[in-house]
Amino acid sequence: MNKRLNIRRNGKKKGTAESLIAKLFIGFLIIMIGCNLLTPDKKTSEKENRVLEQRPKITMSGLLTGSFMKQYEKYLADQFAGREFLRRVKTTLSRVGGSKKEQGVLIGKRDQLFEEIVMPQPELLEKNIQSIQKFVDTHEELTINMLLVPDAATILEDQLPVFAAVEDQRAVFGRIKKTLGKSVNWIDAVKTLSKHSEEKIYYKTDHHWTSLGAFYTFVDAAPSLGIKEDVSSKYVSYPVSTNFNGTLAAKSGAKMRIKEEIDIYVPQNTDNDLIVNHVEEQEKMATIYHADKLKTRDQYGVFFGGNSSVIDIKTVSQDKRRLLVIKDSYANCFVPFLAPYYREIVMVDPRYYSGNIEDILQTYKISDVLFLYSGNTFLQDNNLSGVLSSEQSNENGVLNKKRTSETE
């Protein structure tokens, strides 16, 4: 009899405990739903330095195809209440557990973060190389240089996490150089940066190279670019920020407390007056540097304000050459070194430019061309071949805007 009573009591206690847990769980869900409903959506994540998913619109086609639910899942993942706190907790627990990788970012030694090296899709890489070769063959009158900047994991191998395996970017660059042959003047940034691997040539918390890395490469590249003087002592550097924390830290949630310095290099004993025209935005400035960006998380945007489709730089250089730089964001801290040596520099980012490169060549009377990309961007770029194609038309009217603004 006592045994039966004990069983009933234990069962009652167990049922009461399960009921309490269920009620607490339901209450927690109600609180979370309420918080999510009351918390306004954010457009961007300052810490991650990216645009967040917004609430998708309900459409019949979206419901039928299932695309609405996929978009809504991404929206919930980006907008749920307490996301930043829970993200920090996850990163901390992962680090305690010995994880060396977060959100595709490798967490290396000496506080160094690395973007993984991507391997190119053979068809895409072949298409890009063929488009460059065709461009070169069509414009024999132009002097064409190519500079692919290796990503940090290629150069700072000794700082990679233990047992981390990364793709061989050196070998990929070698194949690209061999395929292009003598059609372009190849600037070997791998060789240059390898000589300075113990110096601060890459940011620890960001995927970009530093101004120092760009400067070393510029010094070695100067002869290939037709710059005859010794430029190694022509510039002086100044820090413009000492609290930079970059995109890799934001993406991974690791090393968020690391603060880094951003330097700019200014030519000595040289008149460096210039006019920088953001063509599509129709904005003109008398400087390359956007100090307002230093007040944001995207401090690397101090160089030209970030990426833009077409930027035209008019200088006071006595040199008559006009340079076209077909580029990604790695060029933004490299191009300032070139300003004293060209009459005009035009920067085109194929990721944002939907016009035709022939329009650029004719409008600006280009004499020299420099392809300047980071390795990872070039190996994934599906815009380059389209921009180099002579079959595209200038539908977005970027250059027409330029002509209009210059005649006003």
Image (spheres, rainbow, N blue to C red):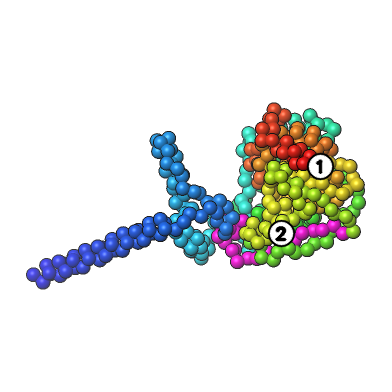
Query: Can the viewer see residue 210?
Result: yes
Give the structural element (helix, strand or loop) at label 1.
strand
| Residue bearing mark 2 | 291
Indicate the amino acid at tag 2. Ala
Pick whichever, 387 or 109, lies toward us.
387
Q: Position of residue 266 (x, y in %)?
A: 82, 58
Image quadrant holding the N terminus, namely bottom left
- Horizontal side of residue 192 vs 375, given as left or right: right
Q: Position of residue 150 (x, y in %)?
A: 71, 49
Tell me what residue is drawn at x 62 percent, y 46 percent: 118
Labels in figure, total: 2
Asked which quadrant contains residue 62, the reply is: top left
Quick check: is 85 in the magenta stretch?
Answer: no
Determine the residue positioned at 21% across, 68% down. Answer: 13
Amino acid type assigned to the residue bearing label 1 in the image: Leu
Q: Label 1 belongs to which residue?
A: 323
Q: Residue sitting at 75 percent across and 61 percent down? A: 263
Q: Is residue 255 left or right of residue 24?
A: right
Question: Start and end of the magenta stretch?
Answer: 246-268
**Circle 1 residues within 10 Å: few <14, some 14–19, many ≥20:** many
Which residue occupies the extreme left position in the image?
1
Residue 331: percent from left, percent from top: 74, 49
Q: Residue furthest front?
A: 408
Q: Nearer the viewer, mark 1 or mark 2?
A: 2
User: What percent of the width, then of the height, locates residue 137?
Assistant: 79, 30
* Quarter of the figure with residue 368: top right
Query: How many residues crowd around disc 2 within 10 Å: few (fewer than 14), some, or many (20 or more)?
Result: some
Is residue 247 within the magenta segment?
yes
Compare residues 321 and 91 and report the one nearer the observer.
321
Can you name the residue that lies furthest to the top here? 391
- Residue 191: which disc? none
